[in-house]
Amino acid sequence: MMPFGIVGEYMIKSQPDSYRIPIQVAVYCYRRGNNGIIQWLMLKRATNTNPCWQGVTGAPFEGEALIDAAGRELFEETGLRPLSLVQSSYSYTYTIPAYNRHKFAYDAKTITEYVFVAQINAAHEDVVLTEEHVEYCWVGFDEAQRLLSWQENKKSLQIVYRMITREIL
């Protein structure tokens, strides 16, 4: 894996306008203990409309590179900085739920989500949650699959799991 190359602090920018673009990043974070066991970071959303478990997700700003958006969202939502951050070849499109359509311009009906995997320092335990999430846990692959609600998230985790375990072999 290539090292994640951001120098200095992340710049937290504000959206250029009040609408989101219909693109999103999903970052699945893992750490590998001294025993070689891989654990995945799962975050529980703090919302009444969709209180599900997921990885880090968020939208890039207009003109922001996907890799930069993934690193920024990871830091904003968890306070973590990755040892490596790699985009997978997998992305998918889903229908924007009716309760979220007001957030998007141009009558957007779908969002394309691009999937990333981030390696986190195994000794780093301090996840700092924002108001977007109410809980987090580090779990094995099977438990992460059980916690995830959406089939696309489960497939994403399977793909990035294969990416990192293939690297180990």
Image (cartoon, rainbow, N blue to C red):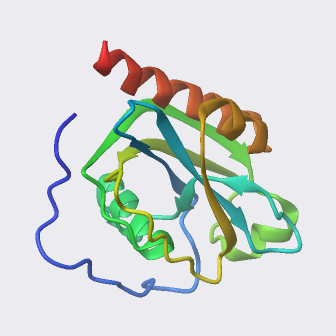
The x and y percentages for residue 79 are 41, 74
The x and y percentages for residue 116 are 42, 43
Q: Residue at x 44, y 71 (%)?
A: 126
Q: Where is the C terminus found, in terms of image quarters?
A: top left
Establish if 99 lies above or below 117. Answer: below
Q: Residue at x 51, y 25 (%)?
A: 159
Residue 18 relative to residue 3: left or right: right
Residue 8 relative to residue 10: left or right: left
**Furthest residue to the top?**
169
Establish if 3 lies above or below 125. Answer: above
Q: Where is the N terminus found, in terms of image quarters?
A: top left
The x and y percentages for residue 120 are 35, 52
Q: Residue at x 77, y 37 (%)?
A: 146
The x and y percentages for residue 111 are 63, 51
Total number of numbered labels? 0
Establish if 45 lies above or below 13. Answer: above
In the foreground, 138 or 115: 138
Residue 81 relative to residue 9: left or right: right
Residue 155 visible in the displayed image? yes
**Furthest residue to the front?**
35
In the foreground, 65 or 162: 162
Q: Residue at x 80, y 74 (%)?
A: 47
In the foreground, 86 or 31: 31
In the foreground, 101 or 43: 43
Residue 152 visible in the displayed image? no
* Displayed quadrant of residue 141: top right
